[in-house]
Image (cartoon, helix red, strand yellow):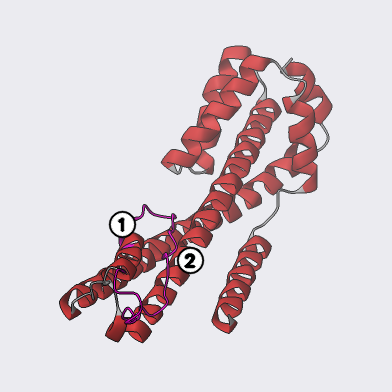
Amino acid sequence: MKTKIIFLFFCLFLFCTIIKSQQTIPPDAEAFYKKAMSSINTKHIAWIKSTAVNVKAQNIDEAGVRKLASGYGSQYNFNNMDVEALVALVMTQCAKDQEEDIKKMMEETKKRNEEKQKLREAQQAMEQNKNAMSRQMLDSFKLLTTTKPNSVTKPQSTRVQTAPSATKLNTPVTTKASDVEIKETQNALKTKQDSIDELNKEQSFQMQKQMDRRSKMMETISNVMKKISQTQDSIIQNMK
C-alpha cells in the first residue's frame, strides 16, 4: 500500500510539473483568436485549421507559416497586417492542437505507469508464492503478459494454495506449477515492464519536443500580436 501511495504521488507530481512547464497562449492572442474565429469567413477558418495541422505534422517554422499565409492572402488581396493575423491565428490553432496532443500523451504515460505498477506487484507476489504456486495462480499472472498496452488484468488470486485435507477426498488436487513455468512467466513480466519503460522514454522525448516547439510558437505569437495590436478590428472586417 505504501509503495502504491508513493507511486501515485510521483505520477501526480510529474503531471503537475509538466502542466506548469507549459507556456499558455498570451491573453491578447487568445482573445483575438476567439473573436476572429467566430467572425471571419468560414473558408478562412477552414484554411487556418487545416494549415495548423500541416504546420504541426511537418514542423514548419515561422518563415514557412508566413510564406503559406502570404500565398493564401494574395488570393484575397490581404494586406501585410492581414497576413500577420493569419500567421498568429495559424500558430494559435497549432498551439491549441499541440496542447491536446500533450494531454493525450500524458494520459497514455499515466496508464502505462499504472500497468507497470501492476506488473511490479505481480512480480513481488510471484516471488513470495513461488514455492506453492498452482497452475491456476500462474495462469492469472500470465494474463498480465498478454494484455494490450495500457490494459491491465488483475490476477485472480495470489493466495497460497494448500493441499486438500483428508476429510475432502473428493476435492480435485490442484496441480503445482513447475519452476520452469514460473521462471518463464517472471521473465515475461520483466520483459513487458522493460517495454513499457522504453515506450515511456520515447513518449517523454516526444513530449519534450512538443513543448519546445510550443515555446517557440508562443514567442512568435507574442511578436505578431504586437504588430497587429492596433489593427485587429479592421483585420477581422477584411476577412469577413
* Callout 2 amino acid: Asn
Mark 2 packing: few (<14 Cα in 10 Å), some, or many (20+)?
many
What residue sits right under mark 1 in the picture?
146
Q: Is residue 3 left or right of residue 191?
A: right
Please give the name of the residue rendered at 42% of the width and 40% of the height, measured from the top-left corner: 58
Answer yes or no: is residue 64 visible. no
What residue sits right under mark 2 in the picture?
113
Which one is in front, 155 or 166? Answer: 166
Write the start and end of the magenta stretch as one range: 145-171
Please give the name of the residue rendered at 83% of the width and 35% of the height, measured from the top-left corner: 230
Above or below — where is 150 with respect to 136? above
Gap in angstroms between the C-alphas marked 2 and 1: 17 Å
Q: Of the residues under marks 2 and 1, which one precedes in the sequence?
A: 2
Which one is in front, 144 or 7? Answer: 144
Mark nearest the camera among 2 and 1 is 1
Above or below — where is 168 with respect to 18? below
Give the residue furthest to the front.
Answer: 167
- Asked which secondary structure carries label 1, the reply is helix
* Callout 1 amino acid: Thr
Q: Which quadrant is the C terminus positioned in?
A: top right
Task: Find out whether the residues at labels 2 and 1 contact each other: C-beta distance under 8 Å.
Answer: no
Q: Is residue 151 magenta?
A: yes
Give the residue furthest to the left.
Answer: 180
Q: Quadrant of residue 162?
A: bottom left
Q: Which quadrant is the N terminus positioned in?
A: bottom right
Above or below — where is 139 with respect to 183? above
Which one is in front, 120 or 224? Answer: 120
- Asked which secondary structure carries label 2, the reply is helix
Picture coordinates of residue 194, whole percent (x, y): 32, 70
